Image (cartoon, rainbow, N blue to C red):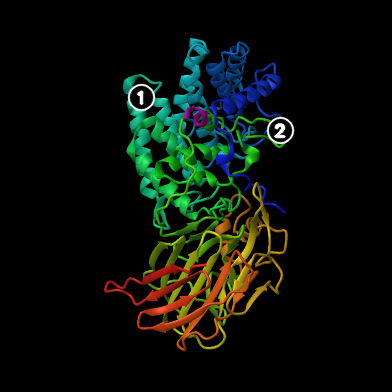
Amino acid sequence: MHLPRQLGPLHDLPDTPEAYDAVLADVTEQALARLTPEGNLEHPDCVDDIGDTSLGITSLLAFAWQRTKDDRLPEAVRRSLAFHLRERVYTDDNPGYPNLTVRNSGLPYARYTLAAGAHPIGDWPSTVWALLQTVNLLDAADGLVEDAQRAELLDLARGYWRWLTEATFFNPQEAGNQAIGCVVGGLMLARHLPPEDGQSVRSRALELYVEKIRTHRVADRGALLPPEHGGAYDNNYGPISLSFLAQAHRVSGEEMFAEDGDALARYIDARLTNGGFDSGGPRYSEQHSAFESVLGLRYFGRRIGSDLGRYRGDTRWARHAAGPDGGVDGHFAWMLVWQIQDPTRWHRTPSTEPVRHQLRAGTVSVAFDDRMTPSVVEAGGTYYLPAAVNRQHGFGPVLDGFVFCRPMGEVRVRDVRTGGLAAKLVTKPVVGRDHVLRHVRSLYVTDGTSLWTMVAVERLPGKPYLLAGLPYAADDGDRVRRTAEGAVASAGTLRLTHPEAQGAEHFDARAELTQEQAAFALAADPRGYGNPDDGWRHLVSSTALEAGPVPDAPDDLHVFAVRYGSAAPLTVSVERDGDGLHIGTSAFTAVIGADDERGEPQLTLSAVSS
């Protein structure tokens, strides 16, 4: 079973002018064949997200005409624009819409679904999308749209902006991508207005960004992020927010959009595995956007000097929104226009700067969460998630159902790179059920092919083991598939266990159920509205790798050693002398030294000559 929305890396999509011309040519032929006598360009199967879709394709036709001067397009643009102005502009309040602040304003808005009162909650983002389609069409209207129709279109754009910012609560779904998109719409609209009016709209857009978005950013992994559906980051919508920040910077030149985009881009880079896999979010945990993310990943990947294009997207939406039959849908059409307009090229090489929340070299990567516990481990083409035991999740020593991975105090990190090796030492103070403070020292070392993890902790009573992850997915190159296996070795005993209990709270990696499906089953609200991250936290137990202690460790320590990426036998030596804790393997030697005068852990590392 393959994960349906994490397919190919987005930077593998051709982005030459010739490739984009071919995309627009295909859109043109589909649209001209679909255009109804009334001027409708909607996909025949479209029900949701419909209020802006015909106008979106109209904007693509106008953009294509700018590039090709195809004489079939002017009439199609005028007819389809007339259809939207006549049939898809609503000024009566949608029955049941809960977010109005002004009743019977008479301002125009776009509906998420057409039937009155059917599903009004989506009208705010639909109107943002319609505003963006409108301003894109205004950008391309010169010489194409007659003056009267253009004036009506401009009035519509102003009306959309006023409805979004005056007649309703701003950003009622707490969705950063929608809110930043609204700001972008205002910035683009301002360029089409008389100077005084334009400055007023621009100022209001910047004010909304500062007061309603920027000051409400949420901290995660050392970054301040635009909140997404109530959480810090969603791996579907976060890269879309990055695209909006790119367009906001392109349109306005305001440095705050670049600063915030750089911060979000570095955060994405740190959490994203080398192979482009990512998991987690308050709206979707595995669903990935596609072409909607290209602009932001490409623009900011170039700015921060890292290969953000490795992000695996839903390549079924490789160029534009599409219906179930693959036919073009106008939703998100504005992003295709901006993507084509932006001349930035992909930055394809990883950043070489050490990052606190990531260790990455070659085909190996570890993404760390806010507590510096691995959130995803990648080695040998397999992705490992934190396992669950007794309602606790993570990687770390376990004793009597208690996982020693949640810090009680400051977490210290040391990065070392030498001789083709990259290493990260993480030191955590941890309190167990006995209220004794212990220091867990976790050393991660990679040669770019395999990952060694060594964990040392003051000796624990009983029979502890290392919770070493949940093998979850594997990289097939152009797709990610589900798995319950991985190439792993331990210097102690090693076992792969599966939950004995059944039911939604117990995740067995051998089942076809995906992590996202399991998470939504445990979420408080229905799929698409519940928080899968919160749902996943209710997991009681999961498939888990469990590694026993290394034999012959110092008497006062338990030491665990695991290697990911190879199942070959693993031998590790652990000794202590005046310099610190010496760890020896066939590939490297490491010394975890005493803390310095500032309490920072010391680490020396050297490769073993072959």
Q: Is residue 402 left or right of residue 423?
A: right
Where is residue 371 shown, x and y percent of the image? 44, 65
**Three-letter amino acid code of the residue under disc 1:** Gly
- Residue beneath label 1, please? 198
Mark 2 burial class by Cα count in 10 Å: few <14, some 14-19, many 20+: few
Q: Which residues are magenta?
A: 338-342
Name above or below for residue 463 compared with residue 390: below
Residue 389 quadrant: bottom right
Q: Is residue 586 left or right of residue 415?
A: right
Label whose residue precedes the other's in the sequence (1 or 2): 2
Q: Is residue 170 visible?
A: no
- Disc ID at residue 493: none
Name the secondary structure under disc 2.
loop
**Along the line of sight, the residue nearer the viewer: 571 or 110:** 571
Q: Name the residue: 39% across, 23% down.
A: 191
Name above or below for residue 424 compared with residue 50: below
Where is residue 394 shown, x and y percent of the image? 53, 68
Q: Is residue 289 left or right of residue 361?
A: right
- Disc ID at residue 45: 2
**Three-letter amino acid code of the residue under disc 2:** Asp
Q: Main secondary structure of the magenta part?
A: helix
Is 32 one of the magenta-colored residues?
no
Q: Name the residue: 68% across, 29% down.
A: 43
Where is residue 391 shown, x and y percent of the image? 58, 71
Q: Name the residue: 53% across, 30% down.
A: 334
